[in-house]
Amino acid sequence: MQNETLKNIFVTGLRNAHAMESQAESLLNRQIERLDSFPDLKARMQAHLQETRTQQSRLDQILADLGESGSTMKDSALSFLGNLAAAAHMPAQDEVLKNSLASFAFENYETAAYKSLITVAEQVGAQNAIAPLKQSCSEEEAMAQFLQNNLDSVTKRYMQMSATGAL
Ligand SMILES: [Fe+2]
């Protein structure tokens, strides 16, 4: 990687993605706690929590290969998605709906972030980073797709439970 400015663009993108995944982890943890009435959604969230931790490790590895670290202190300084995360843990009767909408937005944001980062990796010739970034990107896309597919049934279940006083 010859050009320092371009390398910095890549490192900054990787750190932003790392901060995004830290946010994803806390978002998922908070939602999973309160999803007992929605077992399918809960199970998928738990699976994605594991994926999220693996995605963090991939970013750590890419940063380490560049001689950089993905520290958690830097993550908190970069928590630009704080508002979305806050919206997603406000307790309310319709929180499962709000969380499903926020999660769909979040997973699409993550997909876009990885797509952009893959372009940067290609442009700077970071060959070893491309495959792991593509893997993470496809996991985010799959999660967004699941949430989209699941929105209809979550909405109906929420309405039914509310109507019968089960929520
Ligand atoms: Fe994700």
Image (tube, helix red, strand yellow):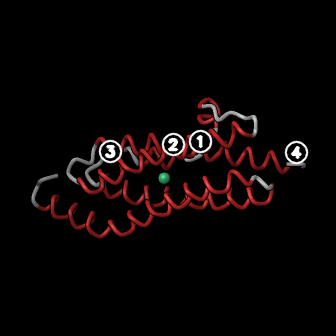
Q: What residue type is labelled 3?
A: Ile
Is there CB contact under 8 Å for labels 2 and 1? yes
SS category of the residue bearing label 2: helix
The mark lying in front, picked from 4 and 3, is 4
Instruction: Indicate the position of residue 1 as horizontal and vertical percent values.
Output: 85, 48
* Secondary element at image label 1: helix
| Mark 4, secondary structure of its residue | helix
Residue 75 at least partly seen: yes
Is residue 94 left or right of 6 when viewed as pictured?
left
Of residues 125 and 166, the one nearer the viewer is 125
Query: Which sits earlier in the primary sequence, circle 1 or circle 4?
Result: 4
Amino acid type at mark 4: Glu
Residue on which disc 3 sits = 32
The answer to which of marks 4 and 3 sits earlier in the sequence is 4
Question: Front-most of 3 and 148?
Answer: 3
Question: Which residue is disc 1 drawn over?
Answer: 19
Q: Residue at x 67, y 46 (%)?
A: 14
In the image, residue 101 lies at what x, y percent? 40, 60
The residues tagged by marks 1 and 3 sit, at their Cα atoms, a distance apart of 20 Å
**Residue where numbered disc 4 is placed:** 4
Q: Report how far apart the C-alphas of labels 2 and 1 lie in the structure.
A: 6 Å
User: Which element is circle 3 on?
Assistant: helix
